[in-house]
Amino acid sequence: MLMLSADAIKISDTGVISPSSIRMESWVKTGTSTAKTSYNARFQVVGYTSSGTSHVIQTSTTNTPTANFSTANAASYSYYVITLYDAGGTTNALDSQTIPVLTDKAAYTIYLDNENHTFAGTNSAAINQSVTVGVFAYKGRVQVASNVGTIENLPNGMGATINSNNSTSASITFTVNTNMTSPSGSITIPIIVDGITFNKTFSYSIAFAGADGTSVTILGSYNTIEEL
């Protein structure tokens, strides 16, 4: 019979794989006896991906009662099937066990440190200026890299520059000039983390200057003197 040192492989939300290896043992019982004896056999480990593709990870080349296999590549597989074969080859299967790969799926938190900004303006358009918005992503409590995607549908007169992309210090600099007359609006910012796209919204407006007051022409002036 096949005995294993673990019945599952776990991957934490920070990518730590546990255990780092699994010990495989071959044992045999004779008759009704509860005693077991180690048995020289061969072990084969096959990994299965989420799409069902299988890969032979390890096959014993000699007869042995024990063997170990590394779980270092467990993130590439959904589960493993470990089969115990009779000594001499991989023809006569004696026992097998399935080892699932369990992943802790931590919640993602994605945010901009400034989601609303008001640009100063004249009475009809924006004034040349810029603002930098930080992009932050967390997986559970751990900050992870933010990959800012293509920012589209910017209003006329506004540009966007992505800084330090695909890092934990990513940011976006929005620059406006006097061609920007759109009084307000919003821009969708795609942020990719671990292959997942999250859309955040940056809202903007222009604080237009007040209109000049109506001019007055003074035709003349006079003083009034009151006698007591």
Image (cartoon, rainbow, N blue to C red):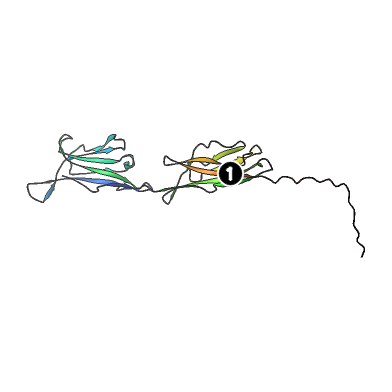
| Residue 114 image point, x, y percent | 55, 48
Q: Residue at x 33, y 39 (%)?
A: 76
Q: Residue at x 23, y 46 (%)?
A: 23
Q: Residue at x 51, y 40 (%)?
A: 188
| Residue closest to the eye, 137 or 188 | 188
- Name of the residue lying farthest toward the right: 227
Mark 1, other Cα within 10 Å: few <14 / some 14–19 / many ≥20: some
Q: SS class of the residue under badge 1? A: strand
Q: Is residue 166 visible?
A: no
Q: Which residue is mark 1?
A: 204
| Residue closest to the eye, 135 or 215 | 215
In which quadrant of the rendered view does residue 177 lie? top right
User: Of the residues shown, which amino acid type is indicated by label 1?
Assistant: Tyr
- The N terminus: image quadrant: top left
| Residue 15 image point, x, y percent | 37, 46
- Name of the residue lying farthest toward the left: 31
Q: In the image, 156: left or right of 57?
A: right
| Residue closest to the eye, 32 or 157 | 157
Q: In the image, 67: left or right of 164?
A: left
Q: Residue at x 90, y 57 (%)?
A: 224
In which quadrant of the rendered view does residue 86 lie? top left
- The C terminus: image quadrant: bottom right
Whether residue 180 is situated above or below residue 219 in the rendered picture: above
Q: Is residue 118 visible?
A: yes
Q: In the image, 82: left or right of 122?
A: left
All told, the count of numbered labels is 1
| Residue 18 image point, x, y percent | 31, 48
